[in-house]
Amino acid sequence: MKVNGTHYRSLWWNAQDDVLEIIDQRSLPYEFITQQVKTLEDFEDAIVEMRVRGAPLIGATAAYGMALALKLDASDAHMDAAWERLNETRPTAINLRWALNRCREAMRPLPEAERAAAALQLAHDIADEDVEICRQIGEHGLKLIREIAAKKPAGEPVRLLTHCNAGWIATVDWGTATSPMYHAHDAGIPLHVWVDETRPRNQGALTSWELGSHGVPHTYVTDNAGGHLMQHGQVDMVIVGTDRTTRRGDVCNKIGTYLKALAAHDNGVPFYVALPSPTIDWTVDDGVAEIPIEERSPRETTHIQGTMEDGSIGVVQVTPEGTPGGNPAFDVTPNRLVTGLITERGVCEATPEGLAALFPEMAGA
Ligand SMILES: CSC[C@H]1O[C@H](OP(=O)(O)O)[C@H](O)[C@@H]1O
């Protein structure tokens, strides 16, 4: 999407320097900083430290990481070692494992001399595919928003709520949850988006940065405001992203998503999940029991980053010295609380049958 009028993807290949470039999201929304990712350690750091974040973007980044590894040493042993190192970076988003497996399975049969170029091309393909998948999610989500708009007086905005950042910077472009918003805004449908702050890393500020840059009206609210807004009829639809959705439609997403789903269910508010197919884990049924939930540093909860009075980026401690912090980074929303899944192939129920109908080649695998 555009940043100050210039189109960007969240990562891109710098052919002149033969290196991957990323937007360093640790500096957003305060500063727009790009970074070259040159070594495998750089790739690991970018994912672990969330310079790149969001399930699809993590997957695309990992694909470029494998390409670099094979450029350095195209042997099976080095490919497997790189697979292990990149797979260890973050445990929950399935796109990481999906991209690593897709690369390794494609490279294994090739002669070593062909692997580096083939892996780089595959990384480009994965990035381009993600852009198209997210665009298609936008088209299918637009239909849902248009249906709501049709029931409102002319000019009255469709009021959405979203959690975390499932935006264009969580993917290669468009975003997942935000793609329907951008498509609806561009189609002239009045919108207002309630943006959850999303502690502890405050990805809601990233969503606010994105929506503001695109001119989409929004309000940044505390994580705990969503239930109140829904109780008072202020939300027409919830759209969130996902880091891993099971074959029966259980949805793993940023911590707090489950609570939004409970509030939506209690208040009869449609709760939709924007779901690119690489984010479906076809090997898992029960998300609560089977999806590994990343436990991140307690410091992310006891401290918070922001812009200081002098304009510098600073970190302040919000708890007493020595207070222990807990930081589960995701939770799982059972499929019974999900109204529908917005995929690149259309919208389906959050059920095994719904997903199998859209992805028969995967469901039966
Ligand atoms: C389009 S996937 C976005 C997904 O990823 C985020 O997690 P994180 O910021 O920790 O990478 C969050 O769960 C979003 O919904």
Image (cartoon, rainbow, N blue to C red):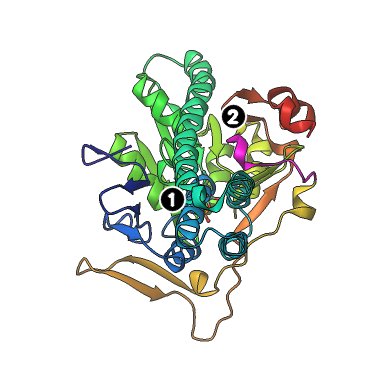
**Residue kind at label 2, given as amino acid type:** Ile
Residue at x 67%, y 60% (from the top left corner) = 293
Q: Amino acid at mark 1?
A: Gly
**Label 2: element kind:** strand
Label 1 residue SS: helix
For label 2, the residue is 342
Q: Could you say where residue 76 lies in the image, as x and y percent from the top left?
A: 62, 59
State the image coordinates of residue 186 (x, y, percent, origin top left): 34, 23
Q: Quadrant of residue 28?
A: bottom left
Can the viewer see residue 54? Answer: no
Location of the N terminus (image quadrant) = top left
Number of the front mark, 2 or 1: 2
Report whether residue 309 is seen.
yes
Q: Quadrant of the C terminus?
A: top right
Dots 2, 1 in contact, CB < 8 A: no
Disc sitting over residue 204 in the figure: 1
* Alpha carbon separation for disc pair 2 and 1: 21 Å
Magenta residues span: 276-285
Report the residue at 53% width, 16% height from top: 147
